[in-house]
Image (tube, grey):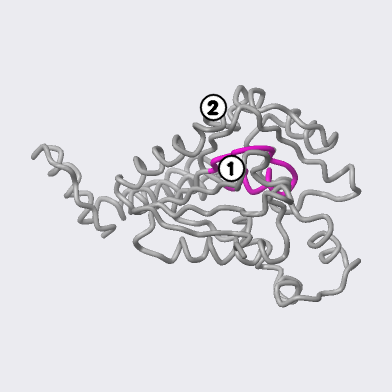
Amino acid sequence: MSLPLTYETRGAVAVITLNRPERHNAMSPEVVCRLADAFDRFEADPEMRVAVLTGAGTGSFCSGGDLELTLPLLSGARAPETEWDHRLTADREVLFRSTLKGAQGTKPVIAAINGHCLAGGFELMLATDIRIAADHARFGLPEARHALIPFAGALVRLPRQLPHAVAMELLLTGDQVEAGRLLALGLLNRVLPGDEVMPAAMAMAERIAANGPLAIAEIKRATAESLGRPLGEGFAIETESMDRVMASDDAREGPRAFMERRAPVYTGT
């Protein structure tokens, strides 16, 4: 029996795959728990530098929380039954970690959006750093239609990543939109034929993984922590990152390797 979420490593890239194509890769309590664990594993592994998050099949990246299993559990309409149910209800930080809502990670995550990206799947996408989507994918936040709200980060992230009026249209109507519109708005990096999405995501992940890991971590930290702050505070955060990076062995290795016309060997120190 295949697992509903898989984690594999390809060099310095971790590939995390939502593996319930028969249920549109909806997030069951087990998937939520396994996804939280996968992100924790990725962040803690010094050998892993970039993650690619995708869905199995060609129909859906992720349709969000499972309406039969997860949402009734969270609303109290269904009592916990399995070990995954009990874990999720006992510690809702598991839910937040599964969508990177909370502590800021230090490593990039790329979304390879192989199909429809809806509800919690859309929110999961918003937590990633780079998004490459299939041209047939559709996107939406239909929660309000079911008398629910997005609670995995979209209410905070979406108005920061899109113009306010567009974000509110998506949140309040629950309408679906095509990938091309989100590409034009800057929410997606690329839109490609479906069979080109994963190769493009892996190629980008490998390029990033070849860069200095400490520099990558500080770029993520400084951009996240300075967002929305006054310029002076933002510059102070940037300067902290500069001091950390410039004191590293990698900061000496990079220019030296360039001058010696060889590939750099970065250690993250």
Q: Secondary structure at mark 1?
A: loop
Badge 2: few (under 14), some or many (20 or more) residues near its Cα, within 10 Å?
some
Give the amino acid at mark 1.
Gly
Q: Which residue lies at the image location 73% right of the left edge and 28% below the top edge?
A: 177
Q: Are marks 1 and 2 in contact (CB under 8 Å)?
A: no
Instruction: Identify which residue, 11 or 217, lies in the foreground.
Output: 11
Does the magenta run of residues contain 241? no
Quadrant of the drawing holding the C terminus: bottom left
Image quarter of the N terminus = bottom right
Position of 137 relative to 121 (above/below): above
> Which residue is rendered at x = 56% and y = 44% of the image?
229
Whether residue 99 appears in this view of the structure is yes
Helix, strand or loop at mark 2: strand
Quick check: 249 above or below 56? Answer: below
Where is residue 173 shown, x and y percent of the image? 85, 34
Q: Residue furthest left?
A: 260
- Amino acid type at circle 2 is Leu
x%, y% of residue 21?
A: 67, 49
Q: Which residue is mark 1?
A: 228
Residue 2 placement (x, y as % from top left) = 60, 62
Q: Position of residue 32 (x, y in %)?
A: 67, 62
Residue at the spot 17% in from the left edge and 43% down from the top edge = 263
- Magenta residues span 111-127
* Residue at which label 2 appears: 192
Is the residue 194 above or below the residue 141 in the image? above
Q: CA distance from mark 1 to mark 2?
A: 32 Å
Left or right, 83 with reference to 3:
right
- Residue name at image x 62 percent, y 54 percent: 19
Q: Dividing the picture into quarters, in which one does residue 207 lie?
A: top left
Q: Horizontally, is 52 left or right of 19 in the view? A: left
Mark 1 and mark 2 lie on one chain; the one further toward the N terminus is 2
